[in-house]
């Protein structure tokens, strides 16, 4: 688990896949993605942060 600018990021390995969750601490908004365990952690992290940004922007409109 890591924190980045008020966002908690958690990696959970499940066999040959990884579930990555991101939670915005200010709003409590949570999103998850699932990807291959062979993908670099930085790529999975960037994808979950992109999804969190999308969901939070969608909530505001």
Image (tube, rainbow, N blue to C red):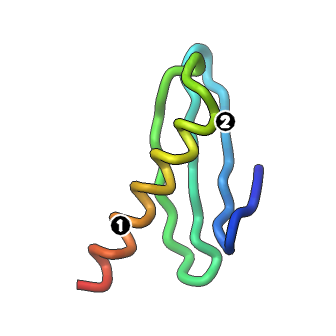
Q: Is residue 6 left or right of residue 60?
A: right
Rendered location of residue 35, percent (x, y): 48, 28
Rendered location of residue 1, percent (x, y): 77, 50
Q: Is residue 16 above or below residue 29?
A: above
Q: Nearer the viewer, mark 2 or mark 1?
A: 1
Q: Is residue 19 left or right of residue 1?
A: left
Say which quarter of the image contains residue 5: bottom right
Which disc, if any, is residue 22? none
**Residue displayed at 59% across by 21% down:** 37
Q: Secondary structure at mark 1?
A: helix
Q: Which residue ends up furthest to the left in the rendered image?
A: 61
Q: Secondary structure at mark 2?
A: strand
Marked residue nearer the N-terminal end (2 or 1): 2
Q: Is residue 24 left or right of residue 2?
A: left
| Residue at the disc numbered 2 | 12
**Residue displayed at 52% across by 47% down:** 46
| Residue at the disc numbered 1 | 55
**Residue displayed at 66% across by 35% down:** 12
Rendered location of residue 6, percent (x, y): 68, 74
Image label count = 2
């Amino acid at each position: 688990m890591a924190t980045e600018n008020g966002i908690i990021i958690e990696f959970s390995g499940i066999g040959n896949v990884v579930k990555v969750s991101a939670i915005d601490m200010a709003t409590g908004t949570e999103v998850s993605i699932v990807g291959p365990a062979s993908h670099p952690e930085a790529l999975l992290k960037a994808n979950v942060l992109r999804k969190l940004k999308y969901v939070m922007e969608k909530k505001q409109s």
